[in-house]
Image (spheres, grey):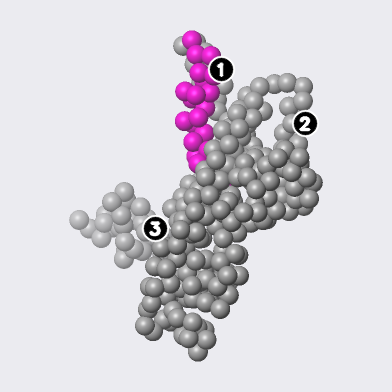
Amino acid sequence: MSATAAGSWLSPTAEPNTPVDRSGRRDTPQKWGNPFTYFVALLFIGVCVAPVLYIVVGGFRTNSQITTNPAALPHPWVAGNYAAVLRSTTFWGEFANSVIVALASTAGIVVLGLMVSFVIARYDFRLKGAMYSLFAAGLMFPMVIAITPLYIVIKDLGLIDNLLGVIVPQIAFGLPMTVIILVPFLRAIPNEIEEATAIDGASRLGFFFRMVIPLSLPGVVTVGILAFVGSWNNYVLPLYVLNAQANFTLPLGVQAFSSQYSTDTAKVLAFTSLAMLPALVVFSVFEKRIVGGLTGAVKG
């Protein structure tokens, strides 16, 4: 084959040494972004991760090590602080209370939020826009602002020092974000699917259970994870509602433990790291689902 014939197989602008993949496309060198952007991103990551690492690693140190050199690594590593916390019945009692509150709040937020979002997204009625706007406005009123009137309502209902006094308000304040995320998911379901389901003889509830829930599962997982993490880390509402230590959740338990063992900094760090571990694990494991669910809500 002549050089002219061989050259005809190459693109006029292609370089002979450029690697070609199996599909026939030439690989282009990867372009890196601005180094300053990476520096800022790493700086923010360090600011977020450093306190968590300090708490976790600090639980493996002794009080003398923390006093002598607060920023050093444990030498030697001591597991006694974590073992002492894990042997404590108080910790496991507060852990059980947090699990009950978090799971009940998450279930209520997901179930009620999905039902409300289905009505707003798939039904046409006169006050549809006003109802959606009402839930959207709920995002502007965090629980901290309404804590005083909320406490009065909980007291009138007789739910002071009761886990229901924490669960019910958390469900109410978790619904706005849930509705805002789920409505685009349910609205994006094609009407043809609903019509085909109706032809098969399914009712509205049948369409809801057979099609809506499976198709909106990414959004449901997202709001469920956000509800669980928010409930697990909630401190203000349990502080106002719960009085007996037997009903404390872990955020209140951390505060009580740090007051009781104020001189034992290493054990306080161990208790704190164990208290925040479940929320960190859940958020880390389902991080991609959270991002995917929020992305789907924006697209919808």
Neighbour tally class for label 2: few under 14, some 14-19, many 20 plus, Cα within 10 Å: few
- For the residues labelled 1 and 3, the Cα–Cα distance comes to 61 Å
Reply above or below: 89 against 97: below
Which residue is at the front of the view, 289 or 90? 90
Which residue is at the front of the view, 84 or 179? 84
Residue under the image location 50 percent in, 59 percent down: 90
Q: Is residue 75 visible?
A: yes
- For the residues labelled 2 and 3, the Cα–Cα distance comes to 61 Å
Which residue is at the front of the view, 230 or 289? 230
* Of callouts 1 and 3, the N-terminal one: 3
Neighbour tally class for label 3: few under 14, some 14-19, many 20 plus, Cα within 10 Å: few
- Numbered circle sitting on residue 12: 3
Quadrant of res 44:
bottom right
State which quarter of the image contains the C terminus: top right
Look at the image and give the residue range highlighted in magenta.
201-227
Residue under the image location 39 percent in, 67 percent down: 83
Disc 1 marks a residue whose amino acid type is Arg
Disc 2 marks a residue whose amino acid type is Ala
- For the residues labelled 2 and 1, the Cα–Cα distance comes to 23 Å
